[in-house]
Image (cartoon, rainbow, N blue to C red):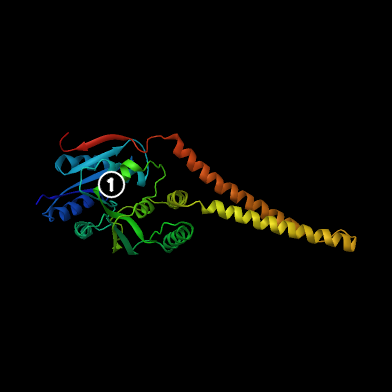
Amino acid sequence: MPKLKLTIVTPVYNEEQVILSFHERTRAVLDKMEDVEARIVFVVDRSTDNTLALLRDAAAKDTRTRVLALSSRFGHQMSLLAGIENSLDADAIVMMDSDLQHPPELIPELVAHYRQGCDVVFTVRKDTEDASKLRKALGNLFYYALGRLSKTPINPNAADFRLISARVAKILASRFEERNMFMRGLFVWIGFKQIGIEYTAEKRFAGESKYSLYRMLKLALAGVLSFTTKPLHLGLIAGLLFAFIAVAFMAVVFVNYFLSQETPSGWTTLTIFLLMFSGVQLIVLGIMGAYIGGIYEEVKRRPRYLIEEDISHHE
């Protein structure tokens, strides 16, 4: 029976404090899997520290390690895509972060479910040991809102730690041309047989999270733009509601004028309504602008990532 060809794809950005520990720990797990032929593909997202140099040395010593150095900062999702598109010769691909919050010891369980016929084996965080209450609250709020707006159900605790089969990887690489990818939603949308397993995210081994509040909001926006147009519908509903209120208020003013022959009071109320209506207009314009901006990014059709170096032991 031939060995399963497994590739671990991990995006890396400024992880010099943890990257060699990740490599050693992951390699130890893979070496124990006797029926698996495994390699690790590091996708370095234009780091500014010593990460690339450390990985270059690791690749020189390990024939099963490959490093893709991107030419600029393309982001976490595009780094994942670069790793997947350059690993299509594998039977299965595991995506995971390199900060050791995704435990490598879970890889054999992911593979076991794949062998049972699952095309996507995703992980669900039971808890995150070092996540702040604010980060958890924002994450839960986003997924709740996305779940209400979109027809694609997404588990609020799902992570970018998952296994996908070769056919799912090839579909993603050949059939999807989106620039603003939200992979947690895309793999749900793709379908096929899926199963989720729970895990507890460990504390960061070293360093700090690279996902700032801004990047979290940017990813959240990509998720909304990718999977629903309901915000546009909500803008229309808000506009109709305020138009109805304006007509009703105008009718009240008109009746009062002819019944009392006096200038009606309530200019403060009118001013408040005017400010609220203006605010709603700006919100709706902002929503439209976000969608138009997304369209603009897509139609430019620039490359989603560029590889500056492809480093392996054989070079």
Q: Is residue 3 visible?
A: yes
* Quarter of the C terminus within the rendering: top left
The image shows residue 187 at horizontal and vertical percentages of 34, 52
Camera-nearest residue between 48 and 290 = 290
Left or right of 230, for residue 53: left
Q: Mark 1 points at which residue?
A: 169
Camera-side residue: 139 or 101?
139
In this picture, residue 254 sits left or right of residue 233: right
The mark tally for this picture is 1
Return the residue nearer the eye: 6 or 272.
6
Give the answer, above or below, for where 199 lies relative to 25. Answer: below
The furthest residue to the left: 1
Residue 16 shows in this picture: no
Residue 214 image offset from top left, x and y in percent: 46, 50
Q: In this view, does 52 lie to the left or right of 142?
A: left
Image location (x, y in percent) of residue 253: 81, 59
Q: How crowded is mark 1: few (under 14 residues within 10 Å), some or many (20 or more)?
A: many
What amino acid is at disc 1?
Answer: Ala
Secondary structure of the residue carrying numbered label 1: helix
Report the residue that reaches farthest toward the bottom. Answer: 126
Is residue 191 positioned above or below 197 on the image? above
Outermost residue, front side: 192
Image point (38%, 53%), residue name: 185
The part of the image, by quadrant, that contains residue 121 is bottom left
Residue 89 position, x and y percent, is 21, 42
